[in-house]
């Protein structure tokens, strides 16, 4: 349910509506807009008599939201969401680097790059310095790795987070890193600028509830067999708990096709953007599984309307401890960035 207030509604009138919603044991989500405030209501609203809210002073109208996901839907929140990161500037900002903050959302195109895993401090520092030179402001790297085999490299855990924090401090490059379980939530939240929820955890509801209380934005990967509705319902879990800073990330789904690791579903971008106001990124590395296929799909993602990319880049991909086959080396990434910049211009997008 969405309560739309009059454009001249007073703060007291808004507060009256919020109090009425609380008395119904429902949750109110005030959404101040350019001209008027709307108040989203979540919870079990089946027993609510809309007239009791409709008659309150300052209320313009009540709109029933038909989709099962409410806060994530355009029905409740028409305008695009921009996720803002208060990144501190690098000690010596490279040419082309903009001011302090970074905005993820339409108009810009955010490139997040880095190795699959944190392997050691040297490779993380080298990667962050390289990214900074290229004007890339966010580095991805996992300290906790969800590996299909228990015998594969599992990540450095807390030591990996410490490395990320030190390198972030030195370079000013922000950190995107995965949270796999609630036990490590405090540590990951402290080290990360953006908390990644991996494909295997998209429906881990206790984890989603935990990050719904986090102070950092959440990058929510699509489950490898999740429908768009299931993906948006997962986003709804995060938003229902009060964390509205959710960035969706398409990373490929399971199909009968076996020519690539997954089938990168770029066709999900237009409907995701139509049904939801949240930014959508694309991960062509996990989406294809082979480094040769990454640049064409990255460019296609930009053309298809994605708001950015999550790309695996490694200083020495052939000796990577995880996902080397799908990782670009520095030269390959630099070349891709040049192509992305060229394509972004006619599309009216600015790389950040
Ligand atoms: C990753 O980003 O390294 C990762 C494990 O991704 P996914 O959850 O998409 O497999
Ligand atoms: Mn990986």
Image (spheres, rainbow, N blue to C red):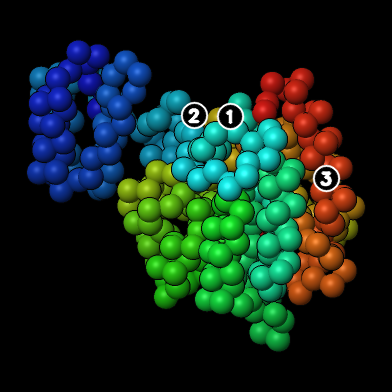
- The residue under the point 75% across, 52% down is 130
Packing grade of label 2 (10 A; few <14, some 14-19, many >=20) is some
Packing grade of label 1 (10 A; few <14, some 14-19, many >=20) is many
- The image quadrant that residue 114 belongs to is bottom right
**Residue 80, which numbered label?**
2
Is residue 150 at least partly visible in the picture?
yes
The span from disc 3 to disc 1 (Cα, nearest Å) is 23 Å
Is residue 1 at least partly visible in the picture?
no
Q: Nearer the viewer, mark 2 or mark 3?
A: 3
- The image quadrant that residue 306 belongs to is top right
User: Horizontal and vertical percent for residue 26?
Assistant: 20, 45
- The residue under the point 62% across, 66% down is 142
Q: Are marks 1 and 2 in contact (CB under 8 Å)?
A: yes
Compare marks 3 and 1 and give the one earlier in the sequence.
1
Residue situated in front as seen by the camera: 115 or 150: 115
Compare marks 2 and 3 and give the one earlier in the sequence.
2
User: Horizontal and vertical percent for residue 66?
Assistant: 39, 34
Identify the secondary structure beneath mark 3: helix
The span from disc 1 to disc 2 (Cα, nearest Å) is 7 Å
- The residue under the point 73% across, 45% down is 133
Give the residue number, with chain letter if any, for mark 1: 106
Give the residue number, with chain letter if any, for mark 3: 334
Q: Left of 115 or right of it: where is 226?
A: left
Q: Nearer the viewer, mark 3 or mark 1?
A: 3
Packing grade of label 3 (10 A; few <14, some 14-19, many >=20) is some
């Amino acid at each position: 349910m969405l309560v739309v207030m009059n454009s001249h509604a007073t703060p007291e009138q808004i507060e009256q509506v919020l109090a009425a919603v609380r008395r119904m044991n429902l949750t109110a989500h005030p959404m101040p807009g350019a001209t008027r405030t709307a108040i989203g209501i979540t919870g079990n609203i089946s027993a609510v008599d809309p007239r009791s809210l409709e008659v309150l002073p300052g209320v313009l109208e009540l709109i029933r939201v038909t989709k099962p996901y409410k806060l994530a839907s355009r029905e409740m929140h028409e305008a695009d969401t921009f996720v803002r990161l208060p990144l501190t500037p690098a000690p010596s900002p490279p040419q082309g680097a903009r001011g302090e903050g970074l905005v993820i959302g339409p108009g810009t195109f955010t490139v997040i790059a880095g190795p699959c895993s944190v392997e050691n401090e040297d490779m993380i520092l080298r990667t962050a310095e390289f990214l900074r030179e290229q004007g890339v402001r966010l580095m991805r790297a996992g300290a906790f790795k969800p590996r299909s085999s228990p015998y594969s490299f599992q990540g450095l855990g807390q030591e990996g987070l410490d490395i990320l924090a030190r390198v972030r401090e030195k370079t000013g490059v922000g950190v995107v890193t995965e949270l796999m379980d609630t036990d490590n939530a405090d540590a990951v939240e402290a080290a990360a600028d953006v908390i990644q929820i991996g494909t295997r955890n998209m429906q881990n509801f206790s984890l989603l509830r935990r990050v719904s209380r986090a102070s950092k934005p959440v990058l929510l990967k699509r489950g490898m067999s999740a429908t768009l509705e299931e993906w948006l319902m997962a986003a709804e879990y995060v938003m229902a708990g009060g964390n509205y800073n959710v960035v969706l990330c398409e990373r490929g789904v399971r199909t009968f096709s076996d020519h690539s690791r997954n089938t990168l579903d770029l066709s999900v971008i237009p409907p995701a953007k139509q049904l939801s106001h949240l930014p959508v990124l694309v991960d062509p590395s996990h989406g294809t599984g082979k480094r040769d296929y990454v640049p064409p799909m990255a460019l296609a993602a930009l053309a298809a309307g994605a708001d950015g990319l999550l790309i695996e880049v490694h200083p020495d991909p052939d000796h990577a401890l995880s996902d080397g086959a799908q990782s670009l080396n520095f030269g390959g990434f630099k070349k891709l960035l040049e192509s992305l910049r060229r394509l972004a211009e006619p599309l009216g997008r600015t790389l950040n």
